[in-house]
Amino acid sequence: AETPAGTDLKPYTPVTDQRLSKPEPQNWLMYRANYESWGYSPLKKINTDNVKNLKLAWSYATGMLDGHQSPPIVNNGYMYVTTPNNQVIAFEAKSGKEIWRYKKQIPEELQQLHPTNRGVALYGDKVFIATTDAFVVALDAVTGKELWKTASADWKAGYYSTLAPLAAEGKIMIGVSGGEYGIRGFIAAYDADTGKEVWKRHTIPAPGETGSETWPKDDSWKTGGGSVWVTGSYDSNTKVSYWGIGNAASWMPDTRPGDNLFSSSVMGIDVNTGELKGHHQYHYGDGWDWDEVSAPLLIDIERNGKKVKSLVHAGRDGYLWWLERDKDKIDFVDAWPFVLQNVFTGIDKKTGRPSYNPTRVPATGKTVNFCPSLWGGKDWTPEAYNPNTGLLYVPANNNLCAEITGISAGKYKPGQLFIGVSLDNILTHVRLDEAAKKNIGEVQAWDMKTGKKVWTHTYPQMNWGPLLTTGGNLVFGGGTNDRKFRAFDARNGKLLWEQAMSSGVIGVPTSFEVDGVQYIAVQSGWGIDAARMQGAFDAVMPTKTLVPQGGVVNVFRLE
Ligand SMILES: O=C(O)c1cc(C(=O)O)c2c(n1)C(=O)C(=O)c1cc(C(=O)O)[nH]c1-2
Ligand SMILES: [Ca+2]
């Protein structure tokens, strides 16, 4: 078989369902390393004792600006990274030698609201991306040659993709963004060999479909949002995938009275048929742009002496959600706030349905103040779970609130913003609670079994750092405007190592091993809403914060 010239790489190892279900410790084969979305690498050569000796092995400037969020994904020495503008770069992971680079041609007229890409999926001998012009593309893993591309929707109608696809059972699954354009969201599966659509499941039901009774009897469901922009989790035993669903559209809930399923929910979806296999709505009738897109982590948690097959989700709504998954349903277990939250007045113990303080529900013609802010207790940045410590790690923003004024979203026009709050208001909406003087950003560690927070590392500024945890009892993450990338002791939160990078780090960190050497990899490259939130923060504060942009792939090893 072909191998890339000038490298020590062996022939490419095809990625199978079996490998994805039980990934080898040396590899990071998908967005969160395993189908359970743990963000966990079992590697432990880099550990709490020696992490202080971590040094850059190689780095690589992508030449791109804006938010670099994708994890370096590694399969036996082959590394794949994506950048804004839908580019994919393949490297020899140990040396940083570029093997190939793919640049999706994108229409010049395309205005990207979120110019980012959250990574590739690997399956067979192919690499897959979903693009901001709403395509799904398959590339040859060794040569980068385009093998097929399929349009998932019409970008001119405001559909785009920013997530890494999910691969299973011969299918490549994606979701679409566009909650701020009034799209009707969906998750779709494509045949990995041919690119042919296998199924499509809308996140907003049409009249007569399950959940349609939660929409008014008008056309609002057609523009109801429910975007999907973070990779789902997957239970390979039951063949059910779990997807987080975004905000309802337009934002003002009085324009679409009702619960608005399946916005701000988790949906269980059979990967072979696209059938709905249960759901739970975290908060109904969303009016806060609290997309609940982060996929729940699949964790077994003991409760009253029994093992509960759980779904765990740190919500943008500021609550930590604990659900139980079954083959055909999702049940509520418990929920509690992990940051300052003043919207919910209670949670129904049986159903998990929150009750709202009515003065904190946005409405057309009203100015409303609420916490957490639009960007939530946690936006898209993934949590991590470490089976050794048994702890869940959450990158949070605390003590932040918002003030927004609902206006008419105007008549819906395909491909035009359909929000109901002015852009100027969105970019200046941040309000600080008194406690924000002490701190905003946090890395939190939760013991789900006891419901107790075990440790918290606080930052004076906000935190937009996805997390990695490892068998060496470490937690890695960046996310602060001082450009630092850090390592903590996973057991107690002690800061063990930090390094300022060339730009702020909002990339998903990963770990892998080649020739017996363990590496930590992360992209730096500040942008998108981390930058906008910093702007919104500076707009109400005397601060003026400069975070330089420019994407770099950084790979570390012990000295
Ligand atoms: O409703 C949507 O379709 C949608 C999509 C995206 C995206 O695709 O990145 C974001 C959001 N909403 C959003 O609300 C949000 O806060 C956000 C932050 C970011 C980012 O990359 O920093 N993307 C998005
Ligand atoms: Ca949104």
Image (tube, grey):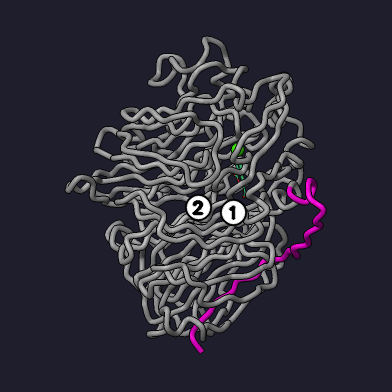
Point out the stretch of residues depicted in magenta.
537-559
Q: Quadrant of ligand 2?
A: top right
Tell me which numbered mark, 2 or 1, is placed earlier along the sequence. Answer: 1
Mark 2 in CB contact with mark 1 (< 8 angstroms):
yes
- The amino acid beneath tag 1 is Asn
Q: Residue at x 57, y 79 (%)?
A: 97
The Cα–Cα distance between marks 2 and 1, rounded to whole angstroms, is 7 Å
Can the viewer see residue 35? no
Q: Position of residue 218 (x, y in %)?
A: 56, 11
Q: Nearer the viewer, residue 57 or 130?
A: 57
Residue furthest to the left: 305
Q: Residue at x 69, y 62 (%)?
A: 481
Q: Quadrant of residue 325?
A: top left
- The amino acid beneath tag 2 is Ala
10 Å crowding of disc 1: few (<14), some (14-19), many (20+)? many
Q: Is residue 524 magenta?
A: no
Q: Residue at x 35, y 37 (%)?
A: 268
* Residue pointed to by mark 2: 164
Q: What kind of element bears circle 1?
A: loop
Q: What kind of element bears circle 2?
A: loop
Q: Position of residue 106 (x, y in %)?
A: 68, 49
In the rendered image, the vertical position of residue 367 relative to residue 74, given as above or below = above
